[in-house]
Structure formats: structure tokens, C-alpha cells
Amino acid sequence: MSNLFVVILFVFLILIFLLLLYKKPIKRSTKKISYGPLIPTEQEEDNNPDINTKNWDLHKIRLIKFGRSQYKGLTFFVSSEDRIYYLSKEGNKVYC
């Protein structure tokens, strides 16, 4: 009885070994991820206050429209008293 168990175990291990050895390679998806253009269009800049701009007029328009705008790397906000400020590194409001 124990010889039969050893033979079955041996055959099972050989089958597992053969399956691992001759396993077909998995076909991976070859989807290409497409990213948008690196330079935003003028319309995207108008409708997204989180895109950095150097255009002062566009910055003012976005402040009025959205209450915030990113200008030359800093995000400016409009307070409830209609004052413009940005946050310092320490988290303090710096009014302009």
C-alpha cells in the first residue's frame, strides 16, 4: 500500500514538473498607452487653473473664474474677502 502511494506521488511530481517545464508563455497585452500632448492647448489652459502659466492676463481671468490659478509655479487663491494670496512653505497665507 505504501509502495502505491510512493508511485502515485512520484507520478504526480513528474506531471507537475513537466507542466512547469513545457508551459506556454502567457501572451501579455500589447496595448500602447497614449499620453496627451506635453504642451497644453490654449483652451485647456483657459479651463484648468492647475496648469502653470506665465500669461498675466490669463492668470487674472482664471482667478476670477475659478478662485485660484497657478502663475509662475505658485498657486494663487482668492479669499472670501476678494483678496489674493498664496501659501508659503510653512503653510501661512501671504497676501499680495
Image (cartoon, rainbow, N blue to C red):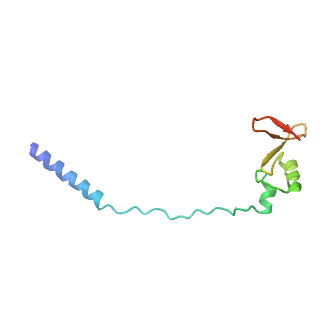
Q: Residue at x 75, y 38 (%)?
A: 89
Where is residue 41 shown, x and y percent of the image? 77, 63
Q: Residue at x 17, y 50 (%)?
A: 10
Where is residue 49 shown, x and y percent of the image? 79, 51
Left or right: residue 3 versus residue 86 is left
Where is residue 22 shown, x and y percent of the image? 29, 62
Where is residue 2 shown, x and y percent of the image? 10, 42
Q: Residue at x 79, y 34 (%)?
A: 92
Left or right: residue 6 versus residue 41 is left
From this viewpoint, which residue is outermost toward the front? 89
Q: In which quarter of the image is the C terminus?
A: top right
Q: Residue at x 83, y 48 (%)?
A: 66
> Is residue 88 shown above or below 28?
above
Q: Nearest the camera: 91 or 67?
A: 91
Q: Quadrant of the N terminus?
A: top left
Q: Nearest the camera: 49 or 11?
A: 49
